[in-house]
């Protein structure tokens, strides 16, 4: 909220200063003209009536110019705001689905950890190559940015261990030990999943089961807050 306010002040302050200066000039010129043209004995080629007509025309033109400038400024910043909002929605959409798909893969791996007959598990996990930049772009409007980074970090640790497993299995499947992967899956699962899911009966799942992420039931309160916050941003 503080960052958003400072950004708004950065945009508005120069505009306010400019309008104040224009207003002062707008007020000063007629006063100067009154002092030098109407309120003195200098002779000019125009009488006071003609000068008054000129002054009225001048003021009308100045008002029109200010209105035009204000309209252009408003249109520019309206377009700028729309572009910023569009970028936030786009990046929150990428982050949201990155995390939902990653958590779904983690859910499958945890079920397999508890029930080895369930083998419908991912061999790889995929995240946007620019996820750090994507998170940074939603940081001004998403207060749980720190939790998003931690969640990505946890899921990346699982992803990296799966890569190591694939590399070793490609050379010699006999020498790979699942213990490290199991520890990471178990540790990360305990950080993100609800107690309800962690203690559920995993034998109820089969390879034919439709394993999807149930945000309300599967996730703990902190993780649920992150996912629901991103969902609100992407749906704006």
Image: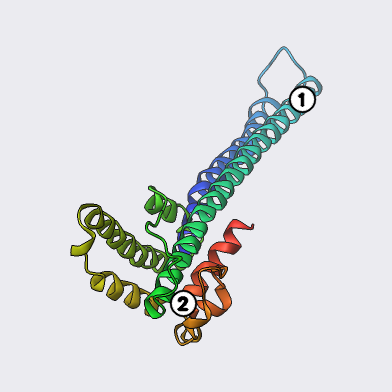
Residue at 25%, 52% in the rendered image: 170
Quarter of the image for residue 177 reads bottom left
Residue at 48%, 53% in the rendered image: 7
Colouring style: rainbow
Label 2 packing within 10 angstroms: few (<14), some (14-19), many (20+)? some
Labelled disc at residue 222: 2
Give how far apart the Cα atoms at labels 1 and 2 are.
Answer: 65 Å
Label 1 packing within 10 angstroms: few (<14), some (14-19), many (20+)? few
Please indicate whether residue 151 sits to the left or right of residue 205 in the image: left
Please indicate whether residue 19 sits to the left or right of residue 109 in the image: right
The residue where tag 1 is placed is 57
| Between discs 1 and 2, the one toward the N terminus | 1
Tell me the element at label 2. Answer: helix
Report the quarter where the C terminus lies: bottom right
Q: Position of residue 207 (x, y in %)?
A: 50, 69
Q: Nearer the viewer, residue 30 or 222?
A: 222
Residue at 39%, 48% in the rendered image: 130
Q: Position of residue 163 (x, y in %)?
A: 29, 56
Q: Eyeballing the image, is 216 above or below 123?
A: below
């Amino acid at each position: 909220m503080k960052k958003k306010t400072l950004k708004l002040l950065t945009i508005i302050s120069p505009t306010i200063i400019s309008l104040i200066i224009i207003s002062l000039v707008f007020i000063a010129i007629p006063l100067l003209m009154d002092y030098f043209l109407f309120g003195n004995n200098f002779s000019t080629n125009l009488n006071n009536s003609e000068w008054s007509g000129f002054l009225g025309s001048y003021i009308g033109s100045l008002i029109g110019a200010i209105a035009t400038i204000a309209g252009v400024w408003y249109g520019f910043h309206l377009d700028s705001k729309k572009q910023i909002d569009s970028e936030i929605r786009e990046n929150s959409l990428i982050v949201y689905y990155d995390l939902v798909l990653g958590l779904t893969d983690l859910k499958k791996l945890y079920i397999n950890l508890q029930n080895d007959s369930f083998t419908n598990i991912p061999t790889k996990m995929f995240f946007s190559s620019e996820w750090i930049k994507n998170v940074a772009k939603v940081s001004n409007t998403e207060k749980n940015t720190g939790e998003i980074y931690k969640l990505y970090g946890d899921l990346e640790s699982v992803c990296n261990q799966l890569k190591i497993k694939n590399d070793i299995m490609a050379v010699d499947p006999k020498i790979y030990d699942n213990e490290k992967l199991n520890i990471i899956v178990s540790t990360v699962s305990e950080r993100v999943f609800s107690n309800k899911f962690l203690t559920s009966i995993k034998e109820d799942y089969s390879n034919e089961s439709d394993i999807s992420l149930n945000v309300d039931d599967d996730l703990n309160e902190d993780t649920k807050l992150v996912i629901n916050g991103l969902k609100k941003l992407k749906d704006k």
